[in-house]
Image (cartoon, grey):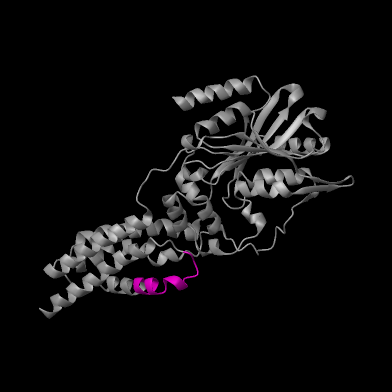
Amino acid sequence: MQRFVYTIIIYLLTTFSPSMSGTRIQAAEPHTTPQEDGIRLSLLTCGPGAEIYSLFGHTAIRYEDLSHGVDVVFNYGIFSFDTPNFILRFTLGETDYQLGVTDYRRFIASYWMEGREVWQQTLNLTPEEKRKLIGLLEENYRPENRIYRYNFFYDNCATRPRDQVEKAVEGRLRYTEDMETTDTGRSFRDLVHQYCEGHPWARFGIDMCLGSEADRPINRRQMMFAPFYVKDFFASATLADSTGVRPLVAATEQVLAIPADARKKEADYPSPLQAALSLLLIVGIATWVGIRKGKSLWGIDLALFSLAGVAGCFWTILAFCSQHPAVSSNYILLVFHPLHLVCLPFMLRKVIKKQISYYMAASGMVLTLFIVLFGLIPQEIHLAVLPLALCLLIRSASNILIGKKQTRR
C-alpha cells in the first residue's frame, strides 16, 4: 500500500513538472542546452531488479521536446512471456525483443514499483546530432524494424542504445580506454558473477548454462552488454569535431532513488552449495545403510540418474543447438548427460538384481576423473557440482560393492 501511494505521488509530481527532480551527481557545461532548441536526449540506466532477467539492470533513451510537451522513453527491452513457445525459443537463442516507446512518467513509476533506482545522463549533442539520433530511433520504431533477435551478450537493451548514439555522432565518439584489446582480465562469467552477487541461485543457474567460451577474456566493448558499463564508459567519453573536444555527457543525475528498506531482497534460502552438500549427506548415509544391509536402494538411483539425465538433455540442447553465445563446450556434460536416461532401464535391471551395472562402472570412472581433475578443467564450474557428482559416484560405487558381494555368495 505504501509503495502504491508513493507511485501516485511520483505520477502527480511528474505531471506538473517537466522531469523528475533528482540529486545532481555531476554536471558539465553542455555544448547545447535543452533550452536552446527545446530538445534533450538522455541515457537512462536502471538498477537491477529481483527477477533473474533484470539482475543486470536496464538501459533506455529518454527524448524530451519541451516546446511540444514530449517526454518519452525509447526502450529496447520489451518482450512477452506469452509469446508462443517462449521457453523453447529462449533456450535455442531465438527470442525476439522489440523497441517500445513509453511515457516517461509511467516508465519511472514502474521502476519505483519494482524498487529499482534510475540514473540519467544528458547527452551533450549538437542540434544536428540530436536530429540524427531521433531519426535513428524513429526508424528503429517502424513496425517492420522494431522487432529484433535478442542476443544476451552482443545485441540487447544496452548495446542497442549505445549503437544508436555512436551512429548519430558519425565516428566522433572517443572512449578514454582501448575498447578492443582483451587486457581487461575479465570474462563474461566474471561479469555474470558480479551482477548475481546476493542471488546465489541465479548465479548457479547461469553458471550451469555457460560453457568454457564464457571464461575467455573479453574486451571493454564486450563488457558493455551490461548497462552499468555503458553508463561508466559514456561518463568519460568525448566527442571531437572541428570546434574542439567536448564531453559526451553534459550532466548526470539520479532521477529515482529508492530507500534501502524499500528495495526488494531475495528470500533467505539455502545456497546451492548448502543444498548440494545436504543431498550428498543424505545419499551418503542411505548408501552406507544400504551396503551394510545388502539392499540396492534402486529408488535412489532412479531419482538421481533420471534428474541428471533430464538436466543433461537441457544442457545438451544448449551446447549443440542454441544460438546463444558462450554456452557451447560445456564440461558440465561430463556429469549431466542424456545417456543417463537412455541407459536407465538397463541399469536399473542390474541394480534391482544386485548385479554389477557396466554403465554404472563406466559412469563411475568418468565421474572420478571429473572430480580428481576438477581444478584443471578449462572452465569455471560451480562448486555445488562437486557434491552432486559425488552423489552419482557414491551410487555407482555402491552398485559395484553390492554386486561383488552378491557374486561371492
Residue 135 or residue 221, whichever sits in front? 221
Residue 130 or residue 29, whichever sits in front? 29
Residue 330 x %, y %: 47, 63
User: Which span is picked out in magenta?
Assistant: 367-380
In the rendered structure, the answer to whether residue 270 lies left or right of residue 302 reads right
Quadrant occupied by the N terminus: top left
Residue 53 or residue 404, whichever sits in front? 53
Residue 143 x %, y %: 65, 34
Q: Residue 381 appears in which quarter of the rendering?
A: bottom left
Q: Residue at x 43, y 55 (%)?
A: 204
Indicate whether 287 appears above or below 239. below
Regarding residue 216, the answer to whether it shows in the image is yes
Q: Residue 164 appears in which quarter of the rendering?
A: top right
Indicate whether 49 appears above or below 188. above
Regarding residue 336, the answer to whether it shows in the image is no
Indicate whether 368 appears above or below 123. below
Indicate whether 219 appears above or below 366. above
